[in-house]
Image (cartoon, grey):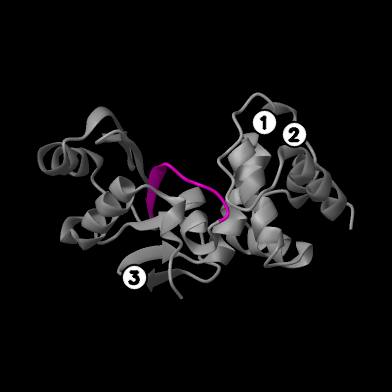
Amino acid sequence: MSLALNAVSPELWSLLKRLMADESMGQFFLVGGTALALRFGHRVSVDIDLFSDRAFDSLRLAELLVSEYGLSEATVEKNTVLGVLDGIKLDCMAHQYPMVVGVEEVEAVRVMAVEDIAAMKLNAIANRGSKKDFWDLYELMQHHNRKEILSFYERKYPQSSLWSVEKSLSYFEDAEADPDPRCLKGRSWDQIKAEIAEWNRL
């Protein structure tokens, strides 16, 4: 499969490729909206989320990112480094939960599988869904049915409440004030809300 490079800026793509080629970043893989946007080309994404399935030395990673990449506005916590590289927001975090499918390599980029990202999107929506999260969920709905997506969540977060997730899937109020993502498939926020609400009643 080829990636939808129109979903990211040339600068983001260049930075992502550089990070992926860096041996010091070998335990990290791309997740989140940018991973989905590159796979499906449904919206433009402007940041890079890199996760690891194991702990890492945050201070050491931050020092590398500052010295080699010019990381600015850095926040460093246990298993977390946040900052900005050349105007692009970067999050590096440990996310130590079971893999549904795992990590795949596409065009020299380590990308978490769609099934895992779907579970993580439900988790994000359950905690405070943004418009981008709902936009991504709508795209995921075009590739997996409701039962499948909920099963991905149960497998990744077996201790979590599926009921609370299902309830949050039709709660859009927290996202209303967010700017609309730049959609590449002609979808509107009202359309996405209506179809997700209907999908969640199935």
Q: Position of residue 69 (x, y in %)?
A: 16, 42
Residue at point 80%, 41% (across, down) = 170
Which residue type carries mark 2? Phe
Of tags 2 and 3, the one toward the viewer is 3
Q: Nearer the viewer, residue 102 or 13?
A: 13
Which residue type carries mark 1? Ala
Residue assigned mark 3: 107
Of tags 1 and 3, the one toward the viewer is 3
In-image side of 176 versus 48 (left or right): right
Q: Position of residue 202 (x, y in %)?
A: 89, 58
Which residue type carries mark 3? Glu
Magenta stretch contains residue 44 = yes
Q: Earlier in the sequence, mark 1 or mark 3?
A: 3
- How many C-alpha atoms fall within 10 Å of the one at disc 3: few (<14), some, or many (≥20)? few
Part of the protein shown in magenta: 42-51
| 142 up-or-down from 124: above or below | below
Q: Position of residue 113 (x, y in %)?
A: 50, 66
Q: Are marks 2 and 3 in contact (CB under 8 Å)?
A: no
- How many C-alpha atoms fall within 10 Å of the one at disc 1: few (<14), some, or many (≥20)? some
**Tag 1's secondary structure?**
helix
Residue assigned mark 2: 172
Between the C-alphas of marks 1 and 3, the distance is: 33 Å
**Tag 2's secondary structure?**
loop
Residue assigned mark 1: 175
Between the C-alphas of marks 2 and 3, the distance is: 35 Å
Q: Are marks 1 and 2 in contact (CB under 8 Å)?
A: yes
In-image side of 25 versus 152 (left or right): left
**Tag 3's secondary structure?**
loop
